[in-house]
């Protein structure tokens, strides 16, 4: 199988009309993160998201993204949150701490709140790698993150709706049994 077949995205174009999004953007390496934000906004708007349905929050660096993402998810104002940051390896182990805590914190944020949190935190060895992923050679990872956010927001809504139909069905199914018991 060719590499292009392995990686091709065969999803239908996602629809974002009626969905609400939160975006947390780190100011550290803002030359990159603002490009990722622009890519994410382009993709959300192209899919039908209204500007009024997109809330953007800025934080100092990637280490601070998880707490802001969790708080945004907890407001109930977002069907999905996109976390945008850029961590570039330096000469010390600082990179590893920031990168691993950002990833761990964002996974915790989505598991704790039940709101999808999309990981758009670049972890690069060089500035050139980051530039490539923010709109040059390798596309814009912000756009990819927006598509993942739309997909997960729709999936979550669908699963919630299916769950409430199933719960209603179970409650209705249980009601006659309770009535029968009282009559006996
Ligand atoms: N934050 C980043 O988002 N990217 C980096 O590359 C980075 N580096 O290399 O230090 C970085 N550090 C700041 C960190 O995220 C916190 O803002 C800071 O430690 C204060 O808590």
Image (cartoon, rainbow, N blue to C red):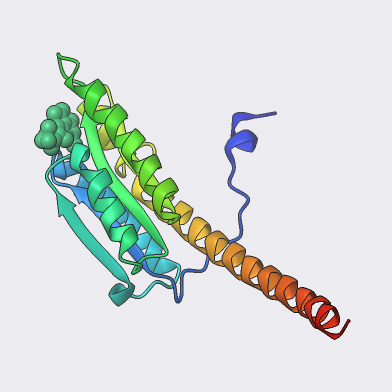
Q: Is residue 172 above or below residue 80?
A: below
In which quadrant is the N terminus drawn? top right
Q: Nearer the viewer, residue 92 or 146?
A: 92
Percent x, y of residue 112: 40, 49
Residue name at image x 28 percent, y 27 percent: 124
Side (left or right) of 132 relative to 59: right
Side (left or right) of 24 relative to 142: left
Task: Locate residue 173: give its quadrant.
Answer: bottom right
Q: Is residue 153 above or below residue 127?
A: below
Q: Nearer the viewer, residue 164 or 28?
A: 164
In which quadrant is the C terminus drawn? bottom right
Percent x, y of residue 95: 21, 23
Residue 139, visible in the rendered structure = no
Q: Ligand 1 is in which quadrant of the figure?
A: top left
Q: Is residue 72 above or below residue 173?
A: above
Q: Residue furthest front?
A: 184
């Amino acid at each position: 199988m060719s590499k292009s077949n392995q990686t091709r995205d065969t999803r239908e174009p996602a629809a974002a009309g009626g969905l609400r999004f939160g975006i947390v953007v780190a100011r550290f390496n803002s030359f990159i993160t603002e490009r990722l934000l622009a890519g994410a906004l382009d993709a959300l708007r192209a899919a039908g998201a209204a500007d009024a349905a997109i809330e953007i929050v800025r934080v100092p660096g990637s280490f601070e993204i998880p707490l802001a993402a969790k708080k945004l998810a907890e407001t109930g104002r977002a069907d999905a949150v996109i976390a945008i940051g850029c961590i570039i390896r330096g000469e010390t182990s600082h990179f590893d701490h920031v990168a691993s805590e950002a990833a761990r914190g964002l996974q915790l944020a989505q598991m704790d709140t039940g709101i999808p949190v999309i990981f758009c935190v670049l972890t690069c060895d060089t500035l050139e790698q980051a530039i490539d992923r923010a709109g040059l050679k390798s596309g814009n990872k912000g756009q990819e993150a927006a598509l993942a956010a739309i997909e997960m927001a729709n999936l979550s809504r669908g699963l919630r709706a299916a769950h409430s139909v199933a719960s209603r069905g179970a409650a209705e199914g249980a009601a006659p049994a309770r009535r029968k018991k009282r009559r006996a």
